[in-house]
Amino acid sequence: MLLDRFKLTDKVAIVTGAGRGIGHGCALAFAEAGANVVCAARTKEQIDATAEQIRKLGRKALPIECDVNEQAHLQRVVDITLETFGRIDIVVNNAGGTAPSEALWTTEQMFNEAFQFNVTSAFALTRLAVPQMLKTAGTGSIVNISSAAGRFPLAGFVAYSTAKAALSQMTRVLGHEFAPKVRVNAIAVGATETTALGMFLDDDLRSKMEKLTPMARLGTVEDIAICALYLASPAAGWVTGKVFEVDGGTETSNWPFDAPKI
């Protein structure tokens, strides 16, 4: 049956930023599809809670405290995953994000830190995981969580937008280089209701953003997790090097604030 291609029975997935938001949603979606999930994030209480939800779904969960900016932490995640499960099938590079800042107030250090968090960390974990995928499973899937901000101008987000554009391009390059054994795809996420957006969101802002979105609503974590499940599963077995736009149909920013001017 076609629906069987979405199953991840006994696969092992590493999800960064799994304590909340999109990472949390992806971890639960993979568990529902039959995967065992390694939940990697900085906040122990959050990944412990995610892991407990996964266990209630009847799957195994392994919470590991991890700062993706630290190479040693990423190596530890890979090592413990192999020690515990003996294989790696899927990696979701979800951890990322950068606070808005006007361009002339964005220092070189801030710009470099945005790249480290959103691009370099994803490359580093991918570089560690892919050889182990080939050794233990013979194949694998990488899903990078990019952003719609990486494909259209979003004033005030120069570091974040540029980093996410780089992550999308890295996805295309690695998808080509790793084919056919390891597939690499990304999701260009539109405005999605997470705790990060929730810090700014009120009824007025929500209404304005919805009016600027063709689908007339903000995205949910589940909207993104469903796409991640598809890309990670055998259902997407002929898909690699692609950036899927899950953004409510937006072709321009739905951030309803005047662009900062010099």
Image (spheres, rainbow, N blue to C red):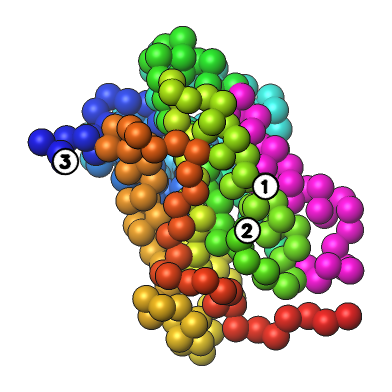
Residue matched to label 2: 150
Tag 1: Cα neighbours inside 10 Å, few (<14), some, or many (≥20)? Answer: some
Say whether residue 222 is visible: yes
Quarter holding residue 90: top left
| Residue type, numbered disc 1 | Ala
State how far apart marks 2 and 3 are (Cα). Answer: 32 Å
Tag 3: Cα neighbours inside 10 Å, few (<14), some, or many (≥20)? Answer: few
Mark earlier in primary sequence (2, 3)? 3
Which quadrant, please, contains the C terminus? bottom right
Residue 101 vertical position relative to residue 40 in the rendered view, above or below: below
Q: Going by the image, does 228 lie left or right of 1?
A: right
Mark number for residue 166? 1
Residue 26 vertical position relative to residue 246 in the rendered view, above or below: above
Residue 110 within the segment the image draws in magenta: yes
Residue 262 within the segment the image draws in magenta: no
State how far apart marks 1 and 3 are (Cα). Answer: 33 Å
